[in-house]
Image (cartoon, rainbow, N blue to C red):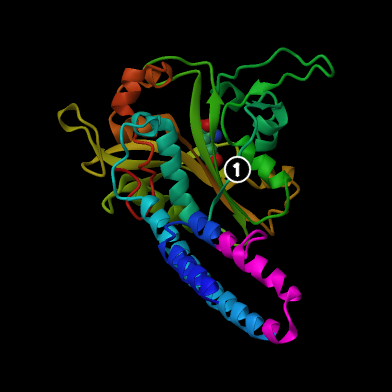
Amino acid sequence: MTEITTLAAAAEQAVAAAQSLDALEEARLNVLGKKGWLSAALKELGSLSPDDRKARAQQLNAVKEQLGAAIETRRTTLADAAINARLKAETLDMTLPVADSAEAQGRIHPVSQVIDEITEIFAAMGFTIAEGPDIEDDFHNFTALNIPPEHPARQMQDTFYLPPRASDGEQMVLRTHTSPVQIRTMESGPPPYRIVVPGRTFRSDYDMTHTPMFHQIEGLVIDRNIHMGHLKGALVEFCKAFFETDNVKMRFRPSYFPFTEPSAEVDINCSREGGVLRVGEGDDWLEILGSGMVHPRVLQHCGLDPDEWQGFAWGMGIDRIAMLKYGIPDLRAFFDADLRWLKHYGFVPLDVPTLGQGVAR
Ligand code: DAH
């Protein structure tokens, strides 16, 4: 009798004193494990006389219940403490600056930055991003865009041709603009479309403002009842967001592209006072993109009925607009992969452009 009471009191103390879930389990096994004293005492019940057995069984069961409850209570306390300690140890202060990590040292190239800014603005207007191959066939780069063979517009672009293909003699080209992705998009499924297409483009040209590889971003909207007003609205909204000023003046100047009718080149106002170019100030004009209503023949090439579907498109040089926005003088340095240049003109990678914070800081 006393022996069990003493053991139970000692066990209760051990449970209360356990500082970890492991220590608690050890205390529990001492009592209730296969070799625990309580398990042993319960096994011995069979050898007692019926009267003794009843009293003893009652006593042992009471002890078992009491210790069981004490163990459960302690287990909950220890588990809570363990979780709280872990939460505290894993706390992360998201407002702290990134230490000298690789992420903090790297820089985003101005071209990537400007692509992110432009796509962010058009994404907010409901556009999605589309892409196409750098190596194009004649049909997508020219013919489907209403530039048939022998058309003088083919000479407007100094095209890189690949050697004739062995299978059929077709001469593929390095795409001279992102416009072929208009065709690929219209071929891919039924309208409506609302896409922007950033990508690499190629022309045989090299000086301060031209490199044989450069970047364009194309836009295309095709739906029912689309008109020039939509084109103008989208591009005005874009310019305000991109240059972060409501004052930017825009001029839609009549122009010619084979794949649009009517066509317009878009200028924005700027000042060149003191040799510094400032956008959205002054009375000078700067051309930033070509645009227009998609030519009915382009729609027909893609199997669309121009009486049912209309739309507008535009194309813009990314590199030039990056030079303009961030005051970078020589385009050729964009592609020299010079780390000193990138450190100077690049962007901190964790400063992702968002409309909420402004697309450029
Ligand atoms: N593809 C033209 C170029 O590279 C730019 C362009 C002009 C694209 C008018 C368009 C457009 O989509 O509508 O010079």
Which residue type does callout 1 highlight? Ala
- For disc 1, the marked residue is 130
Magenta highlight: main SS:
helix
Q: Nearer the viewer, residue 132 or 356?
A: 356
Compared to 161, does 243 lie above or below?
A: below
Q: Residue furthest front?
A: 49
Residue at 28% x, 30% y is 327
What span is in magenta?
28-53
Q: Secondary structure at mark 1?
A: loop
Q: Is residue 70 left or right of residue 327?
A: right
Q: Position of residue 73 (x, y in %)?
A: 48, 72
Q: Residue furthest left?
A: 274
Residue at 37% x, 50% y is 89
Which quarter of the figure is the C terminus placed in? top left
Which quarter of the figure is the N terminus placed in? bottom right
Q: Position of residue 358 (x, y in %)?
A: 32, 50
Q: Nearer the viewer, residue 331 or 159?
A: 331
